[in-house]
Image (cartoon, rainbow, N blue to C red):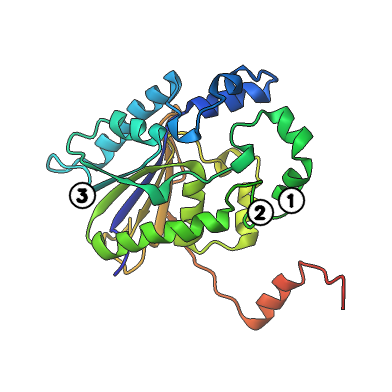
């Protein structure tokens, strides 16, 4: 069975953890001190995050309401910041399913860790993070590759139960990156370039929306696969969007594979 006709992913609004990280990047670790002893699951939204969620909800209502209905299925991560975002979207017909497979990537010892401590205690780990961001695993944490494996379970449910539906999922930034890898069959080279990019368009902002569709935006015809994707940031003024983009899923000839292999120099024979 194919994916839903429309699959909408929403990142949660700014959380207490996000706010603490922004402060730490400026040399102020008071936010992380306040969060000490808590698991990331319990982090709430900040005031800014609540405003972002309300704003995203208004955009979604305007974009997707038809005959008084918005979506056919509503799914949220079990983490508090996602559930709070989901509720504050204010979708009037919502009955939410809570899904443990779409919770945020486990960052292990780096989860509630000030920026200076990351540099001092985990310098080698952070170096490998830049070298191999997809397969690298934070100390006692989870790699993006491992995250993709558990997201497969969520995708199987969507294939099995929701192929004729419009589905919304409220989740997390790393989860949305992993969904992109799976749905778009993104190459490791493309993932690395996007993940390490400092360009604005390559970020996954709080309350950013990713919309996958099997419906051709020009003709309205329904394809077998989710061949079109757009990204929207309702929090920005004017609202930022990529517009609809056609997904081109790569395939490789023998020679093309060997060219990729050569990007990793052989050091032993």
- Check contact, mark 1 vs mark 2: CB within 8 A: yes
Q: Quadrant of residue 150?
A: bottom left
**Above or below 253: residue 89:** above
Residue beneath disc 1: 128
Please give left or right for residue 5 compared with residue 179 in the image: left
Distance between the alpha carbons at the discs numbered 1 and 2: 7 Å
- Ranked by sequence position, the earlier of labels 1 and 3 is 3
The residue at the point 24 percent across, 49 percent down is 73
Distance between the alpha carbons at the discs numbered 2 and 3: 36 Å
The residue at the point 65 percent across, 40 percent down is 198
Distance between the alpha carbons at the discs numbered 1 and 3: 42 Å
Query: Split into 4 quadrants, where in the image is the C terminus?
Result: bottom right
**Relative depth, front residue between 149 and 164:** 149
Q: Secondary structure at mark 2?
A: loop
Q: Secondary structure at mark 3?
A: loop
The residue at the point 71 percent across, 77 percent down is 258
Q: Identify the residue at the far front of this view.
A: 37
Please give left or right for residue 172 compared with residue 96 in the image: right
- Ranked by sequence position, the earlier of labels 2 and 3 is 3
Coordinates of residue 125 in the picture (x, y in percent): 73, 46
Please give left or right for residue 212 compared with residue 191 in the image: left
């Amino acid at each position: 069975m194919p994916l839903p006709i429309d699959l909408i992913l929403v990142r949660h609004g700014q959380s207490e953890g996000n706010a603490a990280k922004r402060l730490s990047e400026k040399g102020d670790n008071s936010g992380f001190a306040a969060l000490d002893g808590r698991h990331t699951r319990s982090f709430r939204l900040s005031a800014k995050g609540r405003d972002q969620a309300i704003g995203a909800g208004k955009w979604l209502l305007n974009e997707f309401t038809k005959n008084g209905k918005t979506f056919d299925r509503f799914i949220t991560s079990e983490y508090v910041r996602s559930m709070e975002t989901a509720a504050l979207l204010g979708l009037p017909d919502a009955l939410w399913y809570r899904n443990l497979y779409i919770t945020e990537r486990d960052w292990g010892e780096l989860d509630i860790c000030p920026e200076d401590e990351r540099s001092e205690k985990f310098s080698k780990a952070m170096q490998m993070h830049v070298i191999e961001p997809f397969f690298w695993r934070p100390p006692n944490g989870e790699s993006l590759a491992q995250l993709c494996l558990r997201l497969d379970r969520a995708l199987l449910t969507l294939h099995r139960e929701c192929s004729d539906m419009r589905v919304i999922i409220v989740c997390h930034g790393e989860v949305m990156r992993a969904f992109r890898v799976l749905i778009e069959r993104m190459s490791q080279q493309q993932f690395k370039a996007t993940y390490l990019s400092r360009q604005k368009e390559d970020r996954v902002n709080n309350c950013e929306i990713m919309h996958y569709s099997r419906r051709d935006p020009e003709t309205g015809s329904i394809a077998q696969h989710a061949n079109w994707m757009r990204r929207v940031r309702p929090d920005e003024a004017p609202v930022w969007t990529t517009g609809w983009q056609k997904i081109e899923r790569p395939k490789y000839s023998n020679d093309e594979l060997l060219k990729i292999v050569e990007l990793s120099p052989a050091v032993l024979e």
